[in-house]
Amino acid sequence: MKRIAVDLAKSVYQVAESVRSGQVVQRKRLNREAFRRYIQEQTESVEWVMEACGTAHYWGRLAQSLGHQVKLLHPRYVRPYRRRNKTDRNDCDAMLEAARCTDIHPVPVKSHDQQQLQQLHGLRETWKKSRTQRINLLRGMLREAGIEAPASTADFIRAASELVDLPELAPLSCLLHIVLAEINLYEQCMAECEQQLQRWHADDEIVRKLDEVSGIGLLTASALTAAVGKPERFASGRQLSAWLGMTPREFSSGDRRKLGHISRQGNVYVRTLLIHGSRAALLAAQRCQSRTPEKLTQLQRWAVQTAARIGHNKAAVALANKLVRICWAVWCHERRFNGNWQSTKPA
């Protein structure tokens, strides 16, 4: 099968055609419209090789709609195959060499709905960061003026409209009210994003099942489904956990084997949501332990014992690792979450 490597850019697309393995027979440098026509002119089935970067999923969907095969490679795996200088031509050659390695797993082409969902999460995260920046700005200005403000974010926002009108900040009062209006705008935007997520996933059975898992809410469930796509491409829950960077990083040589901190590779946003969710689940388990210990599930009991043994923060990460595996099992085996579930190894 003919293999074509494409180095994607904003307006220039470098193309390298290979009929025989390891041999480039033709090179082209095209603009956007010429590249679109070039894809449509391929009458026979072609394997397109691209790095999984900006616009790669769009061009991958376009090629797949015309009956072609698409292989998206992570840039980290392409880089070792690039020889000498960093150029578009050498990048194409590196992609052709990396595509020959069967041990490199390609990145699945995301659907339009998956990308829309991820962009919605990105919008909410951007607005959340902007809101936090303005809240911290107001806190700093109030401290410099000797004004005490509530520690809670919700209490601070409620009291901020009165605090900025104090005589100490009178010259800046009008401008600080603009900052407060921006904070309220960002909160409304975040709320609209969450409502949009609820509308999109109102009838999604997978998201509903993941939402039932302790420490997994609508945000985490929707972000996980958008990032993973098809869970069956992972042979086990541990593979999914390793893909998200939740498993220990290994430093081994010879007979010496050392496991360090988590690898922190993969999707940072999803991993952050999972760890924050596991913190909430661990706190809920500890409250249940102090109030009604007889109602503890086996998962909660394990989390509380782990926190007592290795500390709260490490236990939260360990619980997040376990939650990822539970989500994979709930998703792939199509069963509901049960905190007392006992898995059995196959005979």
Image: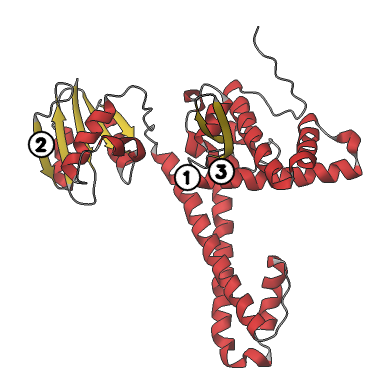
Residue at horizontal 25%, vertical 34%? 95
Describe residue 269's horizontal placement relative to residue 5 as left or right. right
Q: Earlier in the sequence, mark 3 or mark 1?
A: 1
- In depth, the one of 205 and 15 nearer the eye is 15
The reply to whether the C-beta atoms of the residues labelled 3 and 1 are less than 8 Å apart is: no
Q: Earlier in the sequence, mark 2 or mark 1?
A: 2
Residue at horizontal 91%, vertical 44%? 291
Quarter of the figure that contains the N terminus: top left
Quarter of the figure that contains the C terminus: top right
Q: Which residue is mark 3?
A: 271
Q: x, y (%) of residue 290?
A: 89, 44
Looking at the rendered structure, the secondary structure element under dot 1 is helix
Outermost residue on the top side: it is 347
Q: Please, is residue 247 above or below residue 166 in the view?
A: above
Q: x, y (%) of residue 9?
A: 23, 48
Q: x, y (%) of residue 100?
A: 26, 24
* Colour treatment of the image: secondary structure
* Amino acid type, mark 2: Arg
Please identify the quarter of the rendering in which residue 164 is found.
Answer: bottom right
The reply to whether the C-beta atoms of the residues labelled 2 and 1 are less than 8 Å apart is: no
Describe residue 127's horizontal placement relative to residue 49 as left or right. right
Q: Please, is residue 241 above or below residue 308 in the view?
A: above
Q: CA distance from mark 3 to mark 2?
A: 40 Å
Q: Find residue 117 and name its label.
A: 1
- In depth, the one of 175 and 132 nearer the eye is 132
Q: Which residue is mark 2?
A: 27
- Residue 204 can be seen in this image: no
- In depth, the one of 80 and 240 nearer the eye is 80
